[in-house]
Image (tube, rainbow, N blue to C red):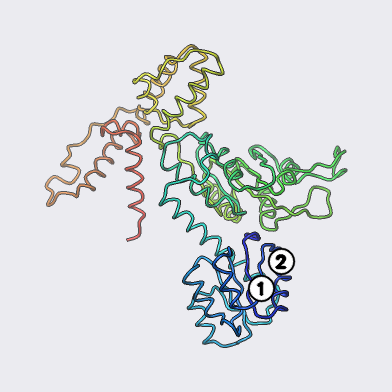
Amino acid sequence: MAAPTLPICLIDDEQQLLESFFISLRLAGYTDIHKILGGRAALEALPNLDCALILLDLNMPDVPGLEILEWMQSERPDVQVVVVTGVDDAETAVRCMRAGAFDYLLKPVEPERLATTVQKALNHAVLLRQNLALRRKLFSGVLDHPEVFADILTMDPKMTAVFQYLEVIAPASDPVLITGETGTGKDLIARAVHQLSRRTGEYVSLNAAGLDDMIFTDTLFGHAKGAFTGAAEARRGLLGQARDGTLFLDEIGDLTLASQIKLLKVLQDRSYYPLGADQPRRSQTRFVAATNQDLNARQADGQFRRDLFFRLNTYHVHLPPLRERGDDVLLLAEHYLEQARAELNRPVEPLAPSLINLLRAYEFPGNIRELRAMLFDAVARGGLHVLHQRLEKLVTTASAPLSGEPCPPPRPIATLWGTTPTSLPTLEQAVQDLIQEALRCAHGNQSQAARLLGISRQALSKRLQRMRDQSTDPE
């Protein structure tokens, strides 16, 4: 059940029907339900009542349901309205749908049909609320809970956008998939999701890399006493520990196919069997998964199940690498230098301009984790001159042609558009041609191409991304 906690409002002029719907929804797992007897009482209560879904009777003697529907469409278009009526009339149904009704049900309504319709309407309400909240956040640029992100040092707008998205999706119960290169802080983002969700249970994490199916199954589901040789005591399992909390599955791309099937079943059924147990246990756990692998490529190779990917990818967060985060490298370098000075009790000189240039030039394939390790190692070895020498070698190596051959000389600019062009290219096309020529000369090395163009590597990365976006835009 995706959204059982969202408030539902029942409006009918018959007390017996109100009670009947109330009982059916409670049995389906919904707990936040309000009952309003009559249309006039509804109009008085609705302006001050928070609800995501209304089940609305159409024929009420004091205030017709259609009038309430039209008022809701005008004043609260984010609230879903399902009309429930005994009138089987096509023209009335069309009027209701045009007035904004999500669905139109005829009395008597079977409990299963009612629960299915309510679930669909609430799912739609969740999406609407998230979209509205995200638009408001992006427009205002303000975080509601900046304290949750205090451990993630950044000044980059892309990271701020990630934080805003997390604040919108955190209250939901569907899985979150976090992707990004190694060392970008996916574990910190997972913890932020848990904190923002205000879930009452624990935050529990598991690294799935290298786990065979037996170990994964026992670790995740637990086992009953005597389930296998050596099982002298029952084991709760991480799902039991994370009940009503969050389970973070890191390196999800390394999970075996057999384990993927078992994880998929938990996500689908919200229940699981500990090893050796006869009775299933319910799971109210929020799943957050992370990987530095390309799951699309893993699917194409048959190493990752497509149905599991779609289950996990309900909400997707991609973390940009450090090389695409502007001056964050300097912000983080200053922070880790101070941390190293305090922990190692060693003096540290300020960052020299030449070292700052090297920090900006190096691409940090290990991202934040690599930066921190470099700084701590340099401080331990006696000073930042050690880091300066190391980065000089790394940047020089990275700038060398990948093929080992010398860079070919750039061609005369006119030859890029033919020897006798009939017309000049647009400015945008000229810039794109220059970028392609620089990459040709640098054998595809972006750092060296950026130097040839006289721009930063980050600026070149942005240009290349814009070119890719333009090439994929529909005509």
| Residue drawn at x 86%, y 37% as measured from the top left | 230
> What amino acid is found at the position of numbered circle 2 in the picture?
Ala
Residue 193 in the image, given as x and y percentages of width and height: 58, 45
Say few, some or many: other residues with alpha carbon within 10 Å of mark 2 (under 14 / 14 to 19 / 20 or more): some
Point out the image quarter for the N terminus. Answer: bottom right
Residue 374 drawn at (x, y percent): 49, 22
- The residue singled out by tag 2 in the image is 28
User: In terms of secondary structure, where does tag 1 sit?
Assistant: helix
In which quarter of the view is residue 115 placed?
bottom right
Is 41 situated left or right of 334 in this image? right
Q: For this view, does 358 lie left or right of residue 285?
A: left
Q: Which residue is mark 1?
A: 114
Q: Which mark is residue 408?
A: none
Residues under numbered marks 1 and 2 in contact, where contact means CB atoms less than 8 Å apart: yes
Asked where in the image residue 289 lies, by quadrant, the reply is: top right
Quarter that holds the C terminus: bottom left
Q: Nearer the viewer, residue 451 or 411?
A: 451
Position of 266 relative to 202 (above/below): below
| Residue 421 x/y as whole percent | 13, 49
Nearer to the camera, 203 or 376: 203
Q: Residue 353: horizontal and vertical position, in percent?
A: 34, 21
**Pointer 1 or 2: first along the chain:** 2
Q: Tell me if residue 276 comes above or below residue 442 in the rendering.
A: below
Q: Residue at x 61, y 79 (%)?
A: 57
- Say which amino acid is labelled 1: Leu
